[in-house]
Amino acid sequence: MVKKPTIFDPGDGMIVSEVGTWASEKHARVQRYIEIASDTRRKYVPPPAWHAGAAYIELFSGPGRSLIRNTKRIIDGSPLVAFKAAQASVPFTEMHLNDVDASNSSAVEMRIRALGGVPTCYSDPADVAVDKIVSALNPSGLHFAFLDPYNLEGLSFDIIRKLSKLKVDMLIHVSVQDLQRNLDDYSRPGGVFDTFAPGWSAHVDRNQAINSFRAALMKYWMTEIRKLGTMPAKGVELIVGSKGQRLYWLVFVSAHGLGRKLWEAIRDPMKQTAMDL
Ligand SMILES: C[S@@+](CC[C@H](N)C(=O)[O-])C[C@H]1O[C@@H](n2cnc3c(N)ncnc32)[C@H](O)[C@@H]1O
């Protein structure tokens, strides 16, 4: 396979990733959540010193800047969007950013530092980084995690289980395209669905039409999330591409009712969807 050439941001000389135009849609939700949750966040940010903190967490951070495919436009990646939104309202007490690719991890660290932030960066597989991050944070704080993997393979249920030991609001990107394209492969015994939604095969009939299978799998996944004591908000958002193709769902999960109310206020009600659409 031909290796893709590395692309650099002429503005800072560091690497960028390549994204579709729809990346801005998820960034807009991250930004709005951070803005709208700022009054709540303030209650966790010192002073007083006993306030337990409010951290921003990404396990799949990217390099912090991205080129929009087929254009010359370079945009902030989610960690920079989050940092700037929090600085303009109530800054996070900590940022924990991980990307398995060391060049992404060091680029995002330098970019946040250039803005005056002091992130803690890791370059591990997400399932390793999550343990380091959970043990570094105060479980009494109010944290926000944006989970944005390319595909379902990276999104093991264990990650969500471990994060839910913290008081954390999570915005989770679930790739519909990946689910659709790789359904056969992923549903084999020992396949990706076994880590994404462990136990699924005892609850979801594989021998049904693709749409209803997908819906049943996601319903099971949401039920398992609920069992962790965290609640998925009602409005799952479907992000579609320029040709109307289904790309991904944004699922908001929160341990407290207020978080879900905030999400209701920022999601685009026109795009709310049942997961079987
Ligand atoms: C969709 S991109 C993240 C984009 C970023 N959230 C943004 O909006 O700017 C996914 C990132 O996950 C990283 N990645 C892939 N597999 C991973 C894994 N198992 N653990 C941690 N990071 C991983 C990739 O290197 C890539 O940078």
Image: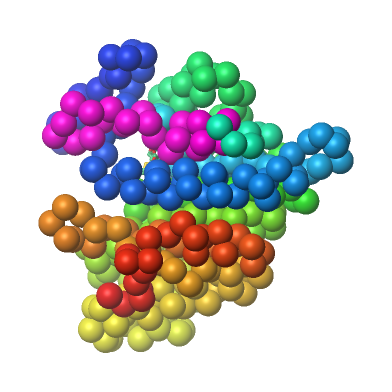
Q: Nearer the viewer, residue 83 or 95?
A: 83
Quarter that holds the N terminus: top left
Q: Is 135 situated above or below 120?
A: below
Residue 127 seen in this snapshot? no
- At which x and y percent is residue 65? 36, 28
- At which x and y percent is residue 199? 50, 76
Q: Residue at x 62, y 45 (%)?
A: 38
User: Which quadrant of the view contains residue 135?
Assistant: top right
Q: Is 82 situated above or below 265?
A: above
Residue 41 seen in this snapshot? yes
Colouring of the image: rainbow
> Magenta segment range?
65-87
Check if residue 68 falls in the magenta segment.
yes
Q: Residue at x 59, y 28 (%)?
A: 119
- At which x and y percent is residue 169? 59, 55
Q: Residue at x 20, y 54 (%)?
A: 241
Q: Is residue 168 left or right of residue 177?
A: right
Q: Nearer the viewer, residue 99 or 117?
A: 117
Q: Is 107 situated above or below 263?
A: above
Q: Residue at x 32, y 26 (%)?
A: 16
Q: Is residue 169 left or right of residue 185?
A: right
